[in-house]
Image: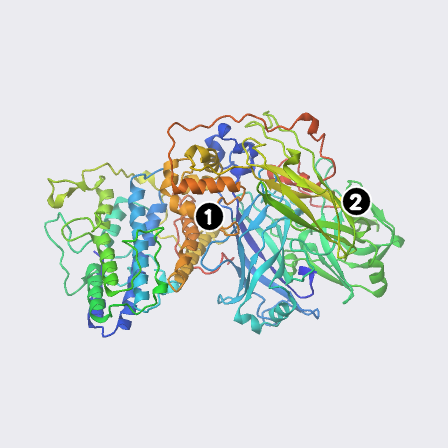
Amino acid sequence: MLRINPTLVSNILSAQSLEELHPMVQGAIELEHSTIPPYLTALFSFKRGKGKEVRPIIESIVIEEMLHMTIASNILNALNGRPQIDKPAFVPNYKCPLPMGINVGFEVGLEKCSIDVVQNVFMEIEEPETILNINYAVKATDTYKTIGEFYGALAKKIDELAPDIMPGDPAKQVVANNYFPPDELFAIRTKQDAIAAIDIIVEQGEGTSTEPVDMYGEVAHYYRFKEIVMGKKLIKDPHADHGYSYSGAPVPFSNDDVWNIFPTTKVWMLPPGSEQWHRAQEFNYFYTMLLEGLHRTFNGEPTFLSNTMGLMYDVKLTGEKLCEMKFPGKDGFYVGPTFEYQKQPPQQM
Amino acid sequence: MSYFDRTHLVFSGDFLSDVSTVNNDPAHYNNATFKPEYQIPREQGSPIMNGWWNPVGGANFIFQNCNVQMVSMNDGNIKDDPTGDFVVGAFITGPSGRNTGKMVDLDPQEQGTSELWAIKFRLVTCANELLFEGDLKPTPFRDLQYRQQDGITSNGQPLGGVWTSVLTNVKWGERANISPFLQELKAKTKGNKLSINLNAYGYYYNHNDGRFAMGRVLGTIGPWYESDPDLFPACRRLYGIYNAGTDEKPKVYFGSTNFVVDQDWKSLRIDFGMSFPISNAVGTVSMTENLYLAVSKSSLSDGVATSEVFLLEHTFEMIGQVKYQTGDHWLNKTGGIMSFDVGPEHMSLLANHQLVLLHLNDDGDYQLVARESVDGYYLRADNFVLRMDADSTAAVTLYAYQYGKPLSNTNITVAMEAPTPCTPVSDKNPISYIPGINFPQDGIKFSPGATGDLNGKTSIGLLAQRIFKPRDYIDGQIYLFDYQFEGQEPDPAFGVESIYVHLRDYFPVPAQPKWEDIEETMIQFANLYPIMSKYIVDLADPHAVAARATILRFAFSQDINDPLYMPVTRDLSEGKRLTILKWLDNPIMPTGAPTTKQPPQKGCPPESLRAESVPTYNRLQKLVAAKQAQNINLDSTPKIFKK
């Protein structure tokens, strides 16, 4: 479970003004983003034509994390804040604890897809407050809070402090219904909009407290990742507890399906001037340009989102090509996507 | 005077051009004969071409590692250090928050005029503060010529080429106000534009030196003036005449070199950045020959030849020695732009006599390396590469000069080249027959002649007719129009210049398109661009296409000047593009199996119309064979001159 620093929750609950919530929501944007590079790295690590059942699972979760990042940005804009996305500190220095977490040794790197990573990292990130089909329920204690509690506190405080009509400029709201359905991504104009949007983030991630699906019947992230570990799709099963069991279509995974990328590859690890070094820098540049484009999108140019689509594909293409390149000097390893902040096109050292 | 203006900036660095190469072979367009191995890279050095050297290229073009090296002020002052002007060292970067531009061929049967599209050019400080930005007007390269003495030792491509263009919609950053150079440039330039020239060389086909798909670029930026063409500088030209190779596989160094004579400042500026021989792919100069610029007192019209031509000393007036430097610093620092002071007598001689580049050999004789165009004539089309749809019109603007001055009221002629025969399947062409070009001859109506105005400017109108798959399996047709001064032969040292038109097939949009209406095109895309089919969406699969309808609809509906425009190659008939969009709005799935058929092989023009051979010496046509690594001299030439 992603353990949230309890002071963040208490800070939300003790806030006296909406402005005091700004850094908390900024933290939420950073947290939602921070899951994307690890998930994308796992996705990019698949060899072409492999992972036909696993890749769509990871891809669907990545897309929802992008949605959550967008929703969190909309909430911050609705609170009259300014999402800060185009800055070096926005990008986690993997391998590292995720934002807002308390450092209890849980660090996230950029690794190839494996059962181990899905089970011990991705499912840990997405673990709900209450895990269904398990005999015990994890309960939040005073030493940590859950991400669900964090969002719950945020919704409660917005309900308490915000006027019925949110104070932010509605023209800054990103409503990209070409890419996300209108009941998942909508303009946050009212207090109720904000609370409903927060519910979407929590339920898509965790499911409800009684079912592993969200309000739209979609399997929550934790349970979707578990499909990879169980090797079967989660389907409705009237005989099972909570009405679901992992007895659906096979979700086969083999370690041979993925390139053996070096964990958390950095540009500095690559020989300067090598082809891999150039391509990794290009990847970083595209990724940073994407952050720059998203920053513009969430800071008053909502229709700019479409322009960033090309960069999303460039990140994907260069990332996948990196995974196919042998790592110079590290026998048996390939180059992983680097996800580092690099504002300038590749430069010689 | 454009980028040759006294006020100019020089930058240098690398570029990445991640072009896709499955489409380099016209035969790969034939869906019926396409095989999966055509999407696999060619093994370096293997005679089996497969998908050539970069089948999964995405056509991205990015300036990398490019910095301002020096600036030249109007008073002749050079600043090559940030302490002189902080713009020295500034970075060239791409657009803010969106993807970069593209480099694409006009067509698989016209690969010698590759264009840059949708490039946003930004000059920023090391702190990423904007100095200026502008949109590069799409521009094809030309003046392809030999650069490397090491042949293909490392990179696999010994040629260099030139992109000349303008930056439009120029916006200046606040920090530009504290650069004396940028202030001067801003004050001089007109129309919110800037002139830009990019001399590219050292492109890597090979996975060597960590530089795969990269090349070097020497860039120059100057003011733009109202009377300037956009896609080439108003200047004078030196043409190389000495062939250091063989008749079959020529190797002409200093092939084309631009220069201007500046009456006001009594000087001559010449751009050796586009032509100076280099010993490797990163711009190292190794030759140590004595080279001189001089003015010939008599008219010269020598053509390209392997034999040496010598000028006697009394037949020319010396302007000065070309004081280049060996090593990799000189070209990259100065861009190869040199300035010569010219005395009054030589100035008046230069007004109506040819400039020559001479080599002083070991015997003390002056060998003619390059000479100015015959009688100083220079005629060039500005927008010489066009993409046209049926029933559309276009105007090509041409400029005529003599010894650098506009040539008024001059007559020019334009002629469509004769149809070329199709190439049957053979040992040398094993995949598919390849259709000919330039037919049907009435595909484009045009005026065969025109008269320039007082400023030497004229335009040729083109009226595109409807053509119906004359090349069977490749969309539309390629037409070449040769132009020259009326009554004159092409300069034997340079040959004919052409206008290149891709006329797309006429294709009416069906009321309710079915998959079968777009299937041939989509399968072809899937075959030719594995970057799409292997990494993003299999365009040959209607269900996969429908599943990505939102993003594909977005890409297929962009403006052609947008980097996201599909198809990236910008070669699809407008009717076909609209049909794809309409299908995406309402995807009607096929009912039967794929219907790929062998095309009917009607892509061969009637014998009576075919050209017997290429009518005139056309350097470009010889050089573009470099992409096929055919008929081009790939040998190393450590010493260009015999003595």
The amino acid type, in three-letter code, at marker 1 is Ser
Q: Quadrant of residue B242?
A: top right
Chain letter for the residue marked with disc 1 in the picture: B
Within 10 Å of disc 2 (Cα), the crowding (few <14, some 14-19, many 20+) is some
Asked if one can make out residue B405 in the rendered structure from this viewpoint, the answer is yes
**Can you tell which mark lies on residue B557?**
1
Label 2 with label 1: CB-CB less than 8 Å: no
User: Which residue is labeled 2 in the image?
Assistant: B486
Vertically, is A154 above or below B508?
below
The amino acid type, in three-letter code, at marker 2 is Glu
For label 1, the SS is loop
**Can you tell which mark lies on residue B252?**
none
Between B23 and B40, the one nearer to me in the picture: B23
- Which callout, 2 or 1, points at the residue further toward the start of the chain? 2
Q: Residue furthest right?
A: B314
x, y percent for residue B290: 77, 54
Between A169 and A9, the one nearer to me in the picture: A169
Between B453 and B623, the one nearer to me in the picture: B453
Asked if one can make out residue A35 in the rendered structure from this viewpoint, the answer is no
Q: Does B85 sit left or right of A141 as displayed?
A: right
Q: Does B337 sit left or right of B319 as displayed?
A: left
Q: Quadrant of the N terminus of chain B?
A: bottom right
